[in-house]
Image (cartoon, rainbow, N blue to C red):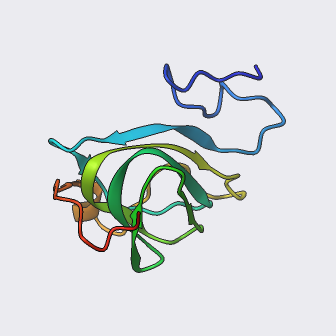
Amino acid sequence: MPVIRTTDRKMGQGNRPEWCGVTSAGMFRIPVENGRADAHYHDCDEYWLVYRGKAKIITEGKTFYVKPGDIVCTKAGDEHDILEVYETLEAFYFEDATPEGGRIGHLHRNAEKAKGHPVPSLPIPEDFPQ
């Protein structure tokens, strides 16, 4: 199973090579209309490879603008979220190996964060990097 078609189903336990340490992988999309996200963390490191759109995110307690070609690297335990979109955001993500005893998926600091939130669509800020 060397090819996982994440357009059909995210990669995870049961559809990844036995030798693969990646816990989960797939794509996500935050549209400019009715986009939603949730502040969450993982028991493993996570990476987003942005291939379309522009947005403002938070990770490691700091905000960053992201655009195509950016890789967001978030270490285990750091809460991260999508705060604003300026153009529909699309990215490929993968969650690194989860340590023994670790939990898989989005983890939340409280029930309110688990509900998620609307992501506002705003004009591109003047200080957005070119």
Q: Position of residue 125 (x, y in %)?
A: 23, 68
The quadrant of the rendering that contains the C terminus is bottom left
Q: Position of residue 17 (x, y in %)?
A: 77, 29
Q: Quadrant of residue 19?
A: top right
Asked if one can make out residue 9 in the rendered structure from this viewpoint, the answer is: yes
Residue furthest toward the bottom?
A: 61
Is 104 on the left-hand or right-hand side of 66? right
Q: Position of residue 85 (x, y in %)?
A: 26, 54
Q: Residue at x 33, y 58 (%)?
A: 55
Q: Give 32 or 79, whichever is nearer the viewer.
A: 32
Q: Residue at x 41, y 40 (%)?
A: 28
Q: Give 128 or 93, whichever is nearer the viewer.
A: 128
Q: Position of residue 40 (x, y in %)?
A: 40, 61
Q: Quadrant of residue 108?
A: bottom left
Residue furthest toward the right?
A: 19
Q: Quadrant of residue 101?
A: bottom right
Query: Where is 31 relative to 60, above or below?
Result: above
